[in-house]
Amino acid sequence: MLDHLPEDGHVRKLWLGENTIYAEHLLRLDPDSRRRRFSGAVSEDFIRRHAEGAHGFDVVVHGFFLDGTLRGAAELRVYAPRFKGEAEAAFSIEQPWQSHGVGSALLERTLLTARNRGVRKLHMHCLAENQRMQQLARKFDAELSFDFGSVVADVDPPRSTVLSMIRELNADNYGIATAIFEAQSRLLRPA
């Protein structure tokens, strides 16, 4: 189901200490993409605080990187224990990379991570006007429901298996190596 990503682009998890590059990505979103990501207008301070809180066992962020720069992200937030087995996913893709398979790649990786964490119901909320997000959800057999100007898409990830755990582990190993390389490249770039 994975679409072809732009050449030299890849998807990997964001690791501890990469909250700043997540914030920088969110701040680069054009006003319409930012409004769609957060379902309304938000301040730059709100975005920085949001990115700073995007870490821990209950939050996993996957990013689409192109030339070492984060250009798209999928944030998986597992709900509190009383909603066991449920999580929410939110997506942000900078305008030039929308409609190029980035959302599909991010959702596919997010679903793998969700299934390996025991998520049985993944919720994706978007504004009713956000046709791209609804198309992406339909592509992964989501059930859509409309509610007061917004849409909730529910996807049921399959149960985890040894193979799905190995797939995530392999992706993480590649992601760690790539993150180290990207960090070194950022340090060596001329100012």
Image: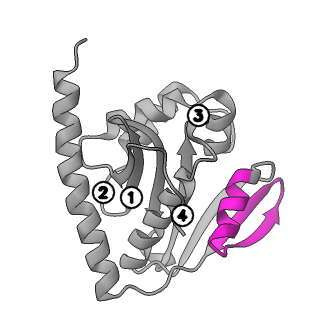
Q: Residue at x 30, y 57 (%)?
A: 56
Numbered disc 1: secondary structure: strand
The amino acid sitting under disc 1 is Val
Place of residue 55 in the rendered image (x, y in percent of width and height, measured from the top left): 33, 51
**Tag 3: amino acid:** Pro
- Measure the alpha-carbon separation of dots 2 and 1: 5 Å
Residue to which mark 2 is pinned: 56
Q: In the image, is 172 to the left or to the right of 143?
A: left
Q: Vertically, is 105 above or below 85?
A: above
| Residue visible at 17% across and 43% down in the picture | 180
Quadrant of the drawing holding the N terminus: bottom right
Q: Residue at x 31, y 63 (%)?
A: 57
Q: Which image quarter holds the C terminus?
A: top left
Above or below — where is 11 with respect to 87? above
Query: Which tag, 2 or 3, sits closer to the chain's start?
Result: 2
Q: Which residues are magenta?
A: 132-154
Mark 4 vs mark 3: give the one in front: 3
Badges 2 and 1: C-beta atoms under 8 Å apart? yes
Quick one: label 2, few (<14), some, or many (20+) residues within 10 Å? Answer: few
Magenta stretch: includes residue 139: yes
Spatial separation of the CA atoms under disc 4 and disc 2: 15 Å
Q: Element under label 3? A: helix
Q: Is the residue marked by circle 1 packed among few (<14), some (14-19), or many (20+) residues within 10 Å?
A: some
Name the residue that disc number 4 marks: 88
